[in-house]
Image: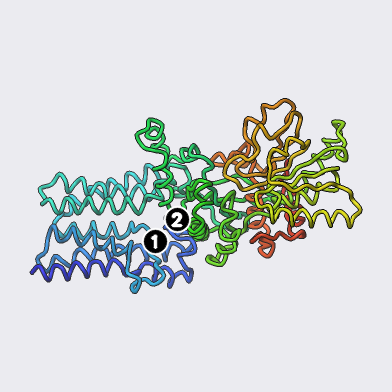
Amino acid sequence: MEALGVVLLMLAYLIGALPVGYWIAKRVSGQDPLSAPAYNLGLESALRKVGAKALFLAFVADFLKGYLAVALLTPFGFGPPWTFAAALLAYLGHLYPFAFLAPRTPLRARGAGVLLGVLAGLSVGGLGTLYALVPLAAALVVYAATGYATLASLTLALALAVVVSFLPFDPWSKALSWALFLLALWRYKENLGRILEGTEPKLGEPLPLPDEKTVVCAFMIHPLTLEDFWQSPRFRWMRPLVEKGLVPAAWIERLAEAFRPMKVGEIRGVKTADGREIRCHLISAPLLPHQIVNKPELAVKRAIQGARLASELGATVFGLGAFWSVVGEKGKKVQEAVPEIQVTNGGALTAGTVRAAIPRILERFEKEGKNPKEATAAVVGATGVVAFGIARQVAPHFGRLILIARDPERLEKIAESLRKNLARKGVETEVVATTDYQSLKEADLIFTATSDPEPVILPEHVKEGAWIYDEGVPPDVHPEVKKIPGVRVIPGGVVRLPGEAKSTLDLHFGGPDLVPACLAETMILAAEAAFERKSLGGETKSENIQYFVERAQALGFTLLD
């Protein structure tokens, strides 16, 4: 008898694993539900993508397979705890099928239909119809009150576990009912996080999916410091544990390495000059800058996972922000791994903001009675693409230019190429290459654009009255530098968004409508669909820089200096 029960449980798993809902939805609608799955955007996105008829039939199919997987045990004389085990295995099969059952693993939906099906199966498998109606009623009340299908599904599983716990069932049945709830809770954890952050769509709400009036992109961010972890409500509860010393900060960092990318926020309200709305999903794998730098293989893996999540969210372009912009050969490996979405590191508009800002900075510098030809400028991080571009632009205007970087051999090659270029133009600027940051004491105007996780320009490096243009993310300039008399720190690479932009997260650029240029490039690339101009790798074409500057102005973006 027990051998037959084991066979029936295996069959329950196999029935649950069959992707019948996916097959039906694809067949009836002619659309691939994976391109905007319920896994990421909820019931509403699936309804919009495949239509009411296909979605209803898929739901019914999932319900029937859940019911069949449990009810098939009853004719053979099996009741609790066997039927509860079948319910758990059917749901487990739906969520985690073997590869041969679902080669493309389409079953990323949370399985609300299967949960209802197994509840119906339990109603004839030992629970009873009356007691089965209690979880159903609770779920309907929660759905009506909140509009969240996620909370309704979890309420269904939780109420079932509570009802079973108060009835005279055996310990195995009670344990299995709670295991079913915990499995559902695990699979709905991302949706719960988005509910806490206010980014999960409710029933009837408009969805952030692309159409003729809406452009959708995604941008990958990361916390700059441990404090940034607490911005997200899903992590905020850990803050007092760390502050009271109950949990070491190092544990939080190690925990962050285990997290896959997740949607942590949105930018809404961006309206272009031609009347379109741009919606941007903010995606994060919560690695700190030093973790991204010191664990490049993990960083590339997370960036690739982030691109796949962006594609599932309906985005057409995926931007790599801050330290993500340099992983995987500055996005090339990410694009190769996820060809279904356009990937950019945002380098073109970043360079464009610098190119546009420098003339204005020099103009203000001169208006204050300072002659650049009699002054010394410095460029920090000169071996980088952006910083070297700055060096080439400012070199003809100053009598002396100091180039600073950590690789002396590469730095000297760059300095020599710059000297030759100046000589061909008949410019007599003195170019000095050094790795010594103390030489910044000689500079009247400092330009910095590094990818260091910590500030590289400290108070002891800067003289009174110096101007500093800081393009670094995180900032290259230590906060204490601003206290030096006469020092002016100008943040670089900042763009003001058109419309009434609002972000659910503080991106640390001075306001909800102020974003880094790489994020603005992501939005513009999505709006214009000029995918051949995306920024990948270490080289940035001059014509692409000019293109993004011009399109930014045409769409209503404002480049700040």
Q: Within the image, what quadrant is residue 465 found in? A: top right
- Does dot 1 land on a helix, a strand or a loop? loop
Residue that carries the numbered disc 2 in the rendered image: 40
Residue that carries the numbered disc 1 in the rendered image: 108
- How packed is label 1: few (under 14 Cα within 10 Å), some, or many (20 or more)? some
Q: Within the image, what quadrant is residue 357 found in? A: top right
Q: Could you say where residue 373 lies in the image, as x and y percent from the top left? A: 88, 40
Label 1 is placed on what type of residue? Arg
Ranked by sequence position, the earlier of labels 1 and 2 is 2
Q: Answer with left or right where residue 148 lies relative to residue 400.
A: left
Residue 495 visible to an observer of this rendering: no
- Residue 391 versus residue 287: which sits nearer the camera? 391
Residue 391 visible to an observer of this rendering: yes
Q: Could you say where residue 447 lies in the image, as x and y percent from the top left? A: 73, 42
Q: Answer with left or right where residue 293 lies relative to residue 258.
A: right
Label 2 is placed on what type of residue? Asn
| 342 up-or-down from 346: above or below | below
Residues at badges 1 and 2 in contact (C-beta under 8 Å)? Answer: yes
